[in-house]
Amino acid sequence: MSQRNMFKHTLTASLAAVTVLLARPAFAADAQQMEANKKTVRALYEAALNKKDFDEASKYLGSKYTQHNPNAADGPEGLKGFIGFLKEKFPNNKSEIKRIFADGDYVIVHVHAVREPGTRGNAIIDIFRLENGKVVEHWDVVQPIPEKAANDNGMF
Amino acid sequence: MSQRNMFKHTLTASLAAVTVLLARPAFAADAQQMEANKKTVRALYEAALNKKDFDEASKYLGSKYTQHNPNAADGPEGLKGFIGFLKEKFPNNKSEIKRIFADGDYVIVHVHAVREPGTRGNAIIDIFRLENGKVVEHWDVVQPIPEKAANDNGMF
């Protein structure tokens, strides 16, 4: 192959590689955003459920907070009310994130929540939706951990 | 720049691009595997909970099935027993996947399950872990949908 042809081939390969690269950064950007979203949800959880500090928690919320937990009122104000209830009735509530997942704009956490120390507590899975790195929507499912189980694996 | 130098620079850029590309396919492979995992979990859910067909469901299971639902016995045999219970007691049980997520080896589904037609049913979030495309572990949280709620958003 002449040097000119080799140059042409190398350039073609280069351009092809660059074209593929340009189509890829979405993956890296998505992965980075999903990791950031996980951190945000961890911080929100810690502030709201463990510190019970609405002012700190609200830093992680967007302008809206659509609530699907049937026991909490809608919006940031609903979360404020829920944190107030927790602070008054269950000041020792401790929520531990056992596993955390992210997919697109969603973060999912599997949580062991103990309202009174020494009790078995609840198994909870929460789904949070984020927009621009802020939490804007929440769903969850809550189940008391039973005393006896049909298997020895535990709920986590 | 001489032709020789231009060639050298193009080659260097090419090699850099190829190096980055070689580090990337994991993203594409992961994304493809996660989509396949979602399909497998949808198929398992349909076979087990709606068709209530253990033979079909078992095609999607690995050699083990570690069960964390406290009401089901461990292993594929436990799932067989649960499907038998459903078939006998709640033959009209209908489980509808409302949203599905994947992260690494895990698939998460948010489900509305109605055991008796016309009842409010349960909100369920399941987490499945897969190995080599087969389901090998399961956690879930189940909550009856209450008649009244503190917000108008519904549990889904």
Image: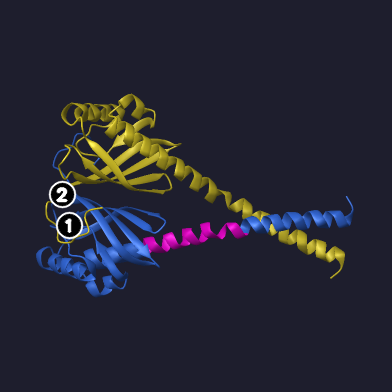
Chain colours: A blue, B yellow
User: Of the residues shown, which amino acid type is indicated by label 1?
Assistant: Pro
Spot occupied by residue B119 in the image (x, y as percentages of width and height): 15, 42
Question: Circle 1 sits on which residue?
Answer: A70
**Horizontal and vertical percent position of residue B75:** 30, 30
Magenta span: chief secondary structure: helix
Asked if residue B53 lies in the magenta stretch, the reply is: no
Q: Dot 1 surroundings within 10 Å: few (below 14), some, or many (20 or more)? A: many
Query: Circle 1 marks a residue in which chain?
Result: A
Disc 2 residue type (three-letter):
Arg
Vertical placement of B80 versus A52: above or below? above
Residue, far top: B55
User: Which one is earlier in the sequence, the residue at label 2 or at label 1?
Assistant: 1
Q: Which mark is residue A99?
A: none
Name the image quarter holding the C terminus of chain A: top left
Residue depicted at 35% across the width and 27% down the height? B56
Magenta part of the chain:
A22-39
Residue B53 sits above or below residue A73 on the image: above
Mark 1: secondary structure: loop
Report x, y in % for residue A140: 24, 54
Q: Is residue A35 magenta?
A: yes
- Which element carries disc 2, helix, strand or loop? loop
Horizontal side of B84 relative to A21 (left or right) equals left
**Total of numbered circles in the picture?**
2
Farthest residue toward the left?
A89
Give neighbour class at mark 2: few <14, some 14-19, many 20+ (Cα, 10 Å): some
- Say the numbered circle drawn on residue A120: 2
Pointers 2 and 1 within a single chain: yes
Chain that bears disc 2: A
Q: Name the outermost residue toward the right.
A: A2
Q: Is residue B89 visible?
A: yes
